[in-house]
Image (spheres, grey):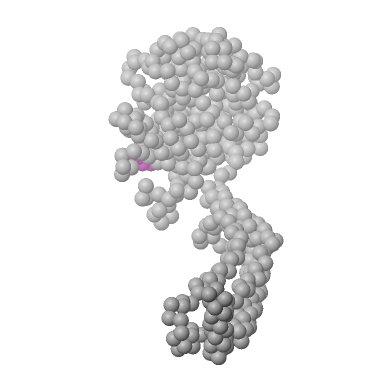
């Protein structure tokens, strides 16, 4: 992790956390790092399997793989991918208040089909196709991601592990049977239904009820605004019998998706890299759709218009990663600044404790013992024990908890004069407190000086002590004579 700087957490799941980071090198780009906790040898193999599968795939509709490495303590495995600033498709669907237009639905669906076909062509079964795992890239295209439970199948192999999201599981998975690539086709149909109806096709109050609805293929019909061809395609894809479901070749080459595929290729040729263009061209050749690539070489002459750029019916949001990150950092600065200013403002209205008056202790009679010793009349006499004066009580201090402010965050122009005025008020309050404390110390010293003068006046002289001793002796002799 020495090469990257963590910015914030993007999300978390059952397999680990995902963070947004930036490369430390000059001009480093934003990346998405998946942190997977390693608990044993099996989990290490699973992590390496996910990294190997992502490394094999290079397609514009699949999240790009960059790097993978193990932590120094061998407890975490990190997978570095491209950052998709548009979020995931599920959040986009949830934010929709009205049904999405059919042209836009087909354009999104054809991109997901191309990415899934590229995985199936490499013999990789995704096993977790859902709207949460479809992300929107910086250029507005839809890409497949999260290959944490993907599996590579050889020829005529079948998977049997019970994994995936229950809402998108195929009937054969619910029954515990073996399944192949047709399970991903079923999940693709559930995703198409969610794009049209803005909800899951199969739901249930309990898990048995959900599984029963999936096995019976019981779902509400699509809204009437969608064409009959789209409803017919959905009916084929969500077929309970896995052998009756169409393949991705049949879905992509269908007449329903032909216009959307046409427009997507036109747009792809404007900004995609050469490696991605070669991958898409090879994919179209494998799908027997090479004529589409030739037709899109001169889109102006052919009269083709890109849905993604110029058609207002299907607007594509423009994601500016650096600007979004800068605005997010500015919001964080403003939030911390407002928090600190509120604490400072609240501290100004807290009643300050009044300085306590110094306590004057009763003065004790101090006697000059040198004169008493000089008489030598009472050798056993000792001076009385003097009581120690009590210390002044300490003033209670009001503690104001102010959270730590982020170092290196510049203040705004509106906050600087306010902070300057606040600091000036604090300096004035400190000066007043220092003056009050000085006056209190002066009064205390003055009182102690008066008590010392009174003590000097109360000291007895040597003649007075001798007279007192003589009177005491006469009283003793008188008492002794009366007794005798």
- Left or right of 415? Residue 273 is left
Image position, residue 254 (x, y; %): 53, 20
Q: In the depicted view, which residue is nearer to us: 25 or 297?
A: 25
Image coordinates of residue 260 in percent, x first then y, are 56, 28
Q: Is residue 289 left or right of residue 411?
A: left
The quarter of the picture where residue 396 lies is bottom right
Residue at the spot 54% in from the left edge and 86% down from the top edge: 470
| Residue 448 image position (x, y, % from top left) | 60, 80
* Residue at x 31% of width, y 28% of height: 42
Question: x%, y% of residue 406?
Answer: 52, 57
Whether residue 137 is visible: yes
Q: Is residue 1 above or below residue 34?
A: below
Quarter assignment of residue 99: top right
Q: Please tell me whether residue 53 is drawn above or below residue 327 in the rendered image.
A: above
Q: Which residues are magenta?
A: 66-70
Q: Is residue 209 above or below residue 465?
A: above
Q: Is residue 234 magenta?
A: no
Q: Nearer the viewer, residue 437 or 470?
A: 470
């Amino acid at each position: 992790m020495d090469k990257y700087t963590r910015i914030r957490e993007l999300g978390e799941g059952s397999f680990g956390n995902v963070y947004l980071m930036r490369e430390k090198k000059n001009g480093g780009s934003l990346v998405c790092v998946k942190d997977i906790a390693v608990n044993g040898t099996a989990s290490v193999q699973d992590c390496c399997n996910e990294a190997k599968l992502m490394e094999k795939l290079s397609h514009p509709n699949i999240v790009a793989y960059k790097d993978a490495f193990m932590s120094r303590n061998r407890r975490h495995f990190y997978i570095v991918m491209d950052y998709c600033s548009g979020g995931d498709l599920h959040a986009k669907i949830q934010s929709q208040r009205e049904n999405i237009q059919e042209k836009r639905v087909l354009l999104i669906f054809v991109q997901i089909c191309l990415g899934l076909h590229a995985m199936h062509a490499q013999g990789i079964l995704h096993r977790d196709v859902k709207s949460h795992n479809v992300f929107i890239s910086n250029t507005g295209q839809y890409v497949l991601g999260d290959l944490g439970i993907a599996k590579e199948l050889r020829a005529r192999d079948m998977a049997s592990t019970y994994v995936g999201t229950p809402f998108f599981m195929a009937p054969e998975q619910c029954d515990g049977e073996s399944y192949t690539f047709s399970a991903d086709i079923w999940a693709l149909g559930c995703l198409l239904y969610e794009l049209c109806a803005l909800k899951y096709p199969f739901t249930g109050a309990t898990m048995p009820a959900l599984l029963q609805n999936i096995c019976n293929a019981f779902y509400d019909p699509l809204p009437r605004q969608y064409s009959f061809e789209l409803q017919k395609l959905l009916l084929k894809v969500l077929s309970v019998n896995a052998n009756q479901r169409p393949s991705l070749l049949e879905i992509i080459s269908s007449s329903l998706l032909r216009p959307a595929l046409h427009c997507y290729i036109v747009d792809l040729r404007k900004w995609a890299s050469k490696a991605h263009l070669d991958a898409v061209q090879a994919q179209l050749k494998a799908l027997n759709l090479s004529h589409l690539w030739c037709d899109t070489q001169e889109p102006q002459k052919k009269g083709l218009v890109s849905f993604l750029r110029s058609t207002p019916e299907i607007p594509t949001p423009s994601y500016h990663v650096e600007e979004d990150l800068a605005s997010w950092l500015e919001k964080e600065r403003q939030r911390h600044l407002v928090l600190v200013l509120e604490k400072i403002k609240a501290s100004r209205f807290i009643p300050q404790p009044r300085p306590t008056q110094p306590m004057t202790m009763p003065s004790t009679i101090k006697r000059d013992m040198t004169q008493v010793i000089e008489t030598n009349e009472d050798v056993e006499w000792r001076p009385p024990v003097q009581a120690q004066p009590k210390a002044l009580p300490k003033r209670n201090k009001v503690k104001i908890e102010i959270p730590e402010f982020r170092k290196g965050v510049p203040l705004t122009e509106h906050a600087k004069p306010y902070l300057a005025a606040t600091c000036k008020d604090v300096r004035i309050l400190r000066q007043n407190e220092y003056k009050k404390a000085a006056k209190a110390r002066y009064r205390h010293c003055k009182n102690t000086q008066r008590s010392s003068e009174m003590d000097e006046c109360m000291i007895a002289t040597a003649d007075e002590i001798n007279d007192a001793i003589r009177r005491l002796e006469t009283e003793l002799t008188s008492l002794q004579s009366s007794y005798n």
